[in-house]
Image: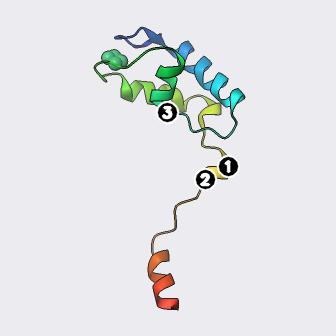
Amino acid sequence: MIICHCTQVSDRDIMSAIDWMRASDPDTIITVGKIYHALGKKADCGGCVSLFVSTMRSNPNFKVPAVLQNLREAPGAEAEKKAAR
Ligand code: FES
């Protein structure tokens, strides 16, 4: 199925690009821009982004690597640090 009509990128293209990126670098963060770049294309109108992202999310290799998860501090952690000083 064609996901991006401007560039003729299909769901299979997106899946293949994600699988290739994850196999090449297990710790990489996969973005829409990186997929376009890997496919040698460039987004035009942006009308496909929502469908493009939902297609990306359907690939199990898309998830954020474990070493990069939960890096953001919990809400309120900054206040607790100040209170402890
Ligand atoms: S439909 Fe994808 S950039 Fe236009």
Q: CA distance from mark 3 to mark 1?
A: 17 Å
Q: CA distance from mark 3 to mark 2?
A: 16 Å
**Horizontal side of residue 65 vs 53, given as left or right:** right
Residue located beneath label 3 in the image: 31
Kind of residue sitting beneath label 3: Thr
Q: Quadrant of residue 20?
A: top right
Q: Quadrant of residue 15?
A: top right
Relative vertical location of residue 25 with respect to residue 11 in this rendering, above or below: below
Which residue is at a point 42% across and 8% down the rendered structure image?
8
The local crowd at label 2, few if under 14, some if 14 to 19, many if 20 or more residues have their Cα within 10 Å, is few
Residue located beneath label 1 in the image: 66
Which residue is at a point 46% across and 70% down the rendered structure image?
75
The local crowd at label 1, few if under 14, some if 14 to 19, many if 20 or more residues have their Cα within 10 Å, is few
Q: Secondary structure at mark 2?
A: loop
Mark 3 or 2, nearer chain start: 3
Q: Position of residue 57 (x, y in %)?
A: 53, 32
Relative vertical location of residue 23 with respect to residue 44 in this rendering, above or below: below
Residue located beneath label 2 in the image: 69
Q: CA distance from mark 2 to mark 1?
A: 5 Å
Q: Secondary structure at mark 3?
A: loop
Which residue is at a point 35% across and 22% down the rendered structure image?
48
Viewer-side residue, 22 vs 37: 37
Q: Secondary structure at mark 1?
A: helix
Which residue is at a point 70% across and 36% down the rendered structure image?
26
- What is the residue that sits farthest to the left in this orientation? 45
